[in-house]
Image (cartoon, rainbow, N blue to C red):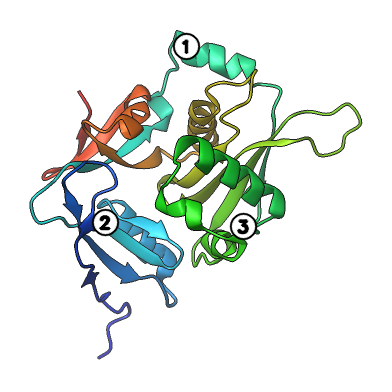
Amino acid sequence: MTAPVRFPRFFVTNPSPCPYLPGKSERKVFTELNGPHTEELNDALGRIGFRRSQNVAYRPSCLDCKACVSVRVLANEFAPNATQRKLLRRNKDLVVEACQPWATEEQFALLQKYLSKRHPGGGMTEMDEMDYSDMVEQSPVKSFVVEYREPTTDGSKGRLVGACLTDQQGDGLSMIYSFFDADHPERSGLGNYIIMDHVLRARAAGLPYVYLGYWVEGSRRMEYKIRFRPLEKLGPDGWERFS
């Protein structure tokens, strides 16, 4: 008798320098996402801390470090604080659209500008247009690119100031990668706004969670994630409230 779902085969990468904590090395366990039950597999792996990159699901599996912690926002209970409410008001004029996962030159140009400002010298700065197209378009699950544009008076498409590659899972939205105009003189905090917009979208769709990926204590690059409360983190005993 054949099992209805093939158990995935997992592999482990070789250790490499950690991008978050100096002096540490990282190792990942991963599996390929393919076959007729890919979305169910991706949902199940997402609930135990895996992330998706193209057709691969991965999570940290470091030998001497457990710093990477999966976190997710409880969408139905999220209540923005005073600073976040101000940010929502400041950007309420943006035109937001969930687009099919199709890479555009405009998105790639914004990504390059974002990386040069926020992550100079990082691995993603070496991406070319084909690499970006692969990141966006090679998705075996339900994905879309949420675009954030400035309004116009004639109804035409306004300037793109933010975007996020997002997966819709069975229990929430998973923010795969977001980028934005980090030099905009009138719209500081766009990255935080994009997260809040996803939380509100999840709530409107009846989805309980927004998955933010990994939080690393002591990494300044990850501090922004703990501003969105209530937040849950994945520990040895499952998901628990972030105190």
Residue extending farthest front: 121
Residue 88 position, x and y percent, is: 57, 19
Residue 116 position, x and y percent, is: 52, 41
Q: In this view of the protein, can residue 88 be seen by the observer?
A: yes
Instruction: For marks 2 and 1, give the CA distance.
Output: 32 Å
Q: Residue at x 56, y 59 (%)?
A: 132
Residue 92 position, x and y percent, is: 66, 21
Residue extending farthest right: 154
Residue 46 position, x and y percent, is: 33, 53
Q: Residue at x 59, y 66 (%)?
A: 130
**Pointer 1: what residue?**
83
- Residue count near mark 1 (Cα–Cα under 10 Å), binned few <14, some 14–19, many ≥20: few
Q: What secondary structure is found at the residue carrying circle 2?
A: strand
- Residue count near mark 2 (Cα–Cα under 10 Å), binned few <14, some 14–19, many ≥20: many
**Pointer 3: what residue?**
101
**Pointer 2: what residue?**
59
| Of the image marks 3 and 1, the number of the one nearer the N terminus | 1
- Describe residue 65's horizontal placement relative to residue 10 as left or right: left
- Describe residue 31's horizontal placement relative to residue 113 as left or right: left
**Quick one: 111 or 139, which is closer to the camera?**
111
